[in-house]
Image (cartoon, helix red, strand yellow):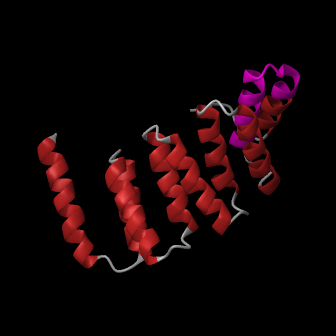
């Protein structure tokens, strides 16, 4: 394991000499994130953000990596940056809603899911996750309405 981490660090350092754009760093971060090397992914996203502080996607991807590490406060900060930069992207709000839910901030998560749904009414996962938050709060009738909407939109299995 230590050897593979060393190799990955070597690849990251070597590739730093070849990286030229924020998009290059973001793509490298996505590669690391897909392999569950979240710390390395975050370093790549930071490089992308350094080159282009207005790269909303890099901020969102950083939020996802922090979330997967269980670093929810850091994830929320990154999602908030992405939302400030580009508030009309439903997936940014959806990611924030998921993280808020994991923190037990159910009312806030519902607000984020509502915003995601407002931006993309066909976002079945947002409808479903809003239903889950409502159900957790004991608002069963509202929850069921959201679950029905998610199913109407084609969501049959949630992972």
Inspect this view and state whether residue 124 appears: no
Q: With 94 as the anchor, is 111 left or right in this view?
A: right
The residue lying toward the viewer, choosing from 62 and 117, is 62
Q: Quadrant of residue 105?
A: top right
The magenta-colored residue range is 124-144
Q: With 5 as the anchor, is 137 left or right in this view?
A: right
What residue is at 50 percent from the left and 63 percent from the top?
A: 58
Q: Whole-percent x and y of residue 16?
A: 26, 72
Q: Whole-percent x and y of residue 128?
A: 72, 34
Q: With 29 as the anchor, is 155 left or right in this view?
A: right
The residue sitting at the left extreme is: 3
Query: Does residue 97 sit above or below 53 in this rendering?
Result: above
What residue is at 42 percent from the left and 70 percent from the top?
A: 48
Could you tell me which quadrant the N terminus lies in? top left
Query: Does residue 107 sit above or below 52 in this rendering?
Result: above
Inspect this view and state whether residue 61 appears: yes
Q: Whole-percent x and y of residue 24?
A: 38, 72
Q: Whole-percent x and y of residue 117?
A: 78, 48
What residue is at 82 percent from the left and 36 percent from the top?
A: 149
Magenta-drawn stretch contains 128 = yes
Could you tell me which quadrant the C terminus lies in? top right
Query: Does residue 45 sit above or below 152 in this rendering?
Result: below
């Amino acid at each position: 394991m230590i050897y593979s981490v060393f190799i990955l660090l070597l690849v990251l350092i070597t590739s730093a000499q070849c990286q030229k754009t924020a998009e290059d760093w973001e793509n490298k971060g996505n590669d690391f994130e897909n392999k569950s090397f979240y710390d390395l992914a975050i370093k790549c996203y930071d490089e992308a953000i350094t080159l282009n502080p207005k790269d909303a996607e890099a901020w969102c991807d950083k939020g996802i990596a922090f979330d997967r590490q269980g670093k929810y406060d850091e994830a929320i900060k990154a999602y908030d940056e992405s939302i400030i930069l580009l508030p009309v992207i439903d997936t940014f709000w959806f990611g924030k809603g998921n993280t808020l839910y994991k923190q037990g901030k159910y009312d806030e998560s519902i607000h984020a899911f509502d915003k995601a749904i407002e931006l993309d009414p066909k976002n079945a996962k947002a409808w479903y996750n809003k239903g889950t938050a409502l159900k957790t709060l004991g608002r069963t009738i509202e929850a069921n309405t959201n679950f029905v909407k998610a199913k109407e939109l084609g969501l049959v299995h949630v992972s």
